[in-house]
Image (cartoon, rainbow, N blue to C red):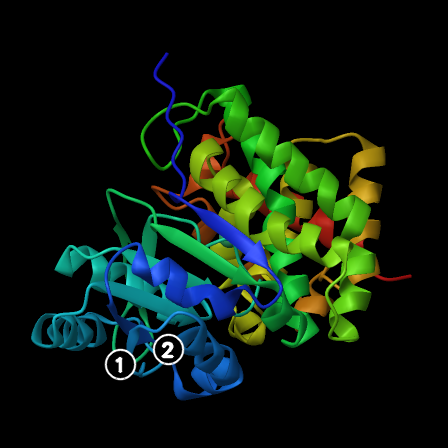
Amino acid sequence: MKKVMISPSKYVQGENELCNLGEYVKAFGNKALLISSKDDQGRVQSLLDEAKQRSPFELLSGGFNLECSWAEVKRLKAVVEVEGCDVVIGLGGGKSLDTAKACAYLTKKPVIIVPTIASTDAPCSALAVIYTEHGEFEEYFFFPQNPNLVLVDTGVIARAPVRFLVAGMGDALSTWIEARACAKSFAQNASHGNSTMAANAIAKLCYETLFEDSLKAKAACEANVVTMALENVIEANILLSGLGFESSGLAACHSIHNGLTVLEETHKFFHGEKVAFGAIVQLVLENAPQEELERTIKYCQSVGLPTCFADLGVTEVTPEKVMKVAIGATAEGETIHNMPFPVTAEMVCGAIFAADKLGAHA
Ligand SMILES: [Zn+2]
């Protein structure tokens, strides 16, 4: 059996670690292009200044127009070429990081990824989501290599709004649930191989870490401080979930998320928040033990993740609406078809209704 596991070349996580950015840039050259919005850069400017003092390097601000579009990628690609940059740095949330990955790939330069929030497991992946200039989904862009370095400053994440961290817990919650399904069905992962024992173990550790440390981590983030629990959850959200999803595969949770996006009401909710509800739906779909369902719902409610339609802003639940979600979730190419049994839109529709009842607040 062909097994494939992929990962970034290096992962570094620590409080004030951004102050050592110069040291990391030096591994690739002297001149770096920073792809980051003004706001995101502003939040960490004092750390970047300290980094330049500690180990001087040239940092050129390329800005970021807030959309990971081909136009923006090409604009920044031209800057790298004209200015002769040695390395590309993406700093911020998902879109600036994806733009940096795409820009680095097209210019054949190394890339350093600096997430300033822990809301998804995208930073470590060899993938970017490309949007039109108006913000509509355009395509997935897969790269042959993962980032050269993912650099996570836990202090920066501790000072970010807590809702981002909680959304990241939702994204990470699905990792083991989906990995387990893919292992049962021998589904292929994103890099066209079967999962390794290592990737499955990482996905499981991700899940266990969340149940152990999420509440403590949330409290730390609310107080804007770094604790061991927060460090563990940041590692779960970014590294463990990142390696887990990419090398073990996705199944129903993420397809349910994609289906939910057809409902306008859910647009103001983060990726991980919708994925959390998707996790409950997958557990119903596969008829997971009652105890596991209860434990998962209780976990989501304890940290503040949605467990029913009302939590996702959908107050009028009609069979037509739910069927629309189910049809979206079971479209051709959706990862729900990695489940170890054939899945139809009718089955998903039923599972969503049952999950909504189970997760409804008393
Ligand atoms: Zn995700």
Q: In screen coordinates, is 66 left or right of 214?
A: left
Q: Position of residue 310 (x, y in %)?
A: 72, 68
Q: Tag 1, which secondary structure?
A: loop
Residue drawn at 59 percent across, 47 percent down: 349
Instruction: Give me the disc on residue 62.
Output: 1
Q: Position of residue 266 (x, y in %)?
A: 57, 70
Name which residue type carries label 1.
Answer: Gly
Q: Is residue 51 above or below residue 140?
A: below
Residue drawn at 85 percent across, 62 percent down: 361
Residue ranking furthest to the right:
362
- Is residue 59 visible in the rendered image? The answer is yes
Q: Position of residue 114 (x, y in %)?
A: 44, 64
Q: In screen coordinates, is 189 left or right of 205?
A: left
Q: Is residue 250 above or below residue 107?
A: above
Q: Position of residue 273 (x, y in %)?
A: 62, 62
Q: In screen coordinates, is 101 left or right of 152?
A: left
Residue drawn at 36 percent across, 80 percent down: 66
**Label 2 crowd (10 A; few <14 / some 14-19 / many >=20):** many
Whether tag 2 and tag 1 are in contact, CB under 8 A, the answer is yes
Q: Is residue 162 above or below residue 254?
A: below
Q: Quadrant of the N terminus?
A: top left
Q: In screen coordinates, is 322 left or right of 248?
A: right
Q: Quadrant of the C terminus?
A: bottom right
Residue pointed to by mark 2: 36
